[in-house]
Amino acid sequence: MKMKAGRTAIMLLAMLCAGPAVAAQCELEIESNDAMQFNKTSMAVPASCKQFTVKLKHVGKLAKAMMGHNWVLSKTSDMQAVVADGISAGLDKDYVKPGDARVIAHTKVIGGGESDSVTFATSKLKADEAYTFFCSFPGHAAIMKGMLTLAK
Ligand code: CO
């Protein structure tokens, strides 16, 4: 047993060291829950990443029609309008207006126990612009939001 555990630890270590180091830095996981919360209030995207992946997890139990969450990214100045148009679009459009050019990236709306991820090109981000990530489910963005920055 000890041998096996040791070998597993070595294998894990080898994977961590040998694996693409870039991948670990170019993705982030964020959790959402039944209390209408994200577990992060800010996210930093390394400028060295060409692509960035955000994995959204819903660690609650409630259905997506009741307590659904998505992860939407826009300029902070565009957020209100994106949210308003998203509400009009409805749940079957993941509360995002189809083809909304102000939306830099978004996941689908998920319910308890589900997850989804989105990958976007960091060339869409400027270092001197303010970006906000939020949940566009009706009524959620006031609480479920945070700052996203392009880090040096
Ligand atoms: Co939400």
Image (spheres, rainbow, N blue to C red):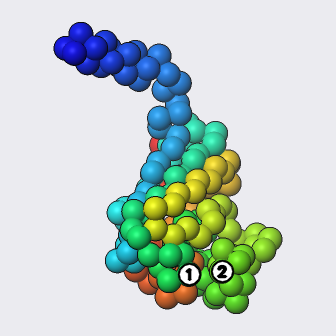
**Residue sitting nearer the eye, 113 or 74:** 113
Give the residue type at disc 2: Leu
Indicate the quadrant where residue 38 lies: bottom left
**Residue sitting nearer the eye, 82 or 66:** 66
Q: Is mark 2 within 8 Å of ligand 1?
A: no
List the single residue furthest toward the left: 2
Say whether disc 2 or disc 1 marks the residue closer to the N-terminus.
1
**Residue sitting nearer the eye, 142 or 45:** 142
Image coordinates of residue 87 in percent, x first then y, are 64, 87
Pointer 2 residue:
91
Image coordinates of residue 70 in percent, x first then y, are 55, 69
Give the residue type at disc 1: Ala
Query: 114 above or below 96?
Result: above
Residue under the point 46% across and 62% down? 113
Query: 27 above or below 57?
Result: above
Image coordinates of residue 52 in percent, x first then y, are 58, 46
Determine the secondary structure under disc 1: helix
Answer with left or right where residue 66 lies relative to residue 119.
Answer: left
Q: What label sits on residue 97 in the rendered view?
A: none
Confirm or deny contact between disc 2 and disc 1 (CB under 8 A).
Answer: yes
Image coordinates of residue 99 in percent, x first then y, are 80, 71
Residue under the point 57% across and 47% down? 53
Residue under the point 44% across and 20% down? 15
Q: What label sits on residue 65 in the rendered view?
A: 1
Residue under the point 41% across and 70% down? 61
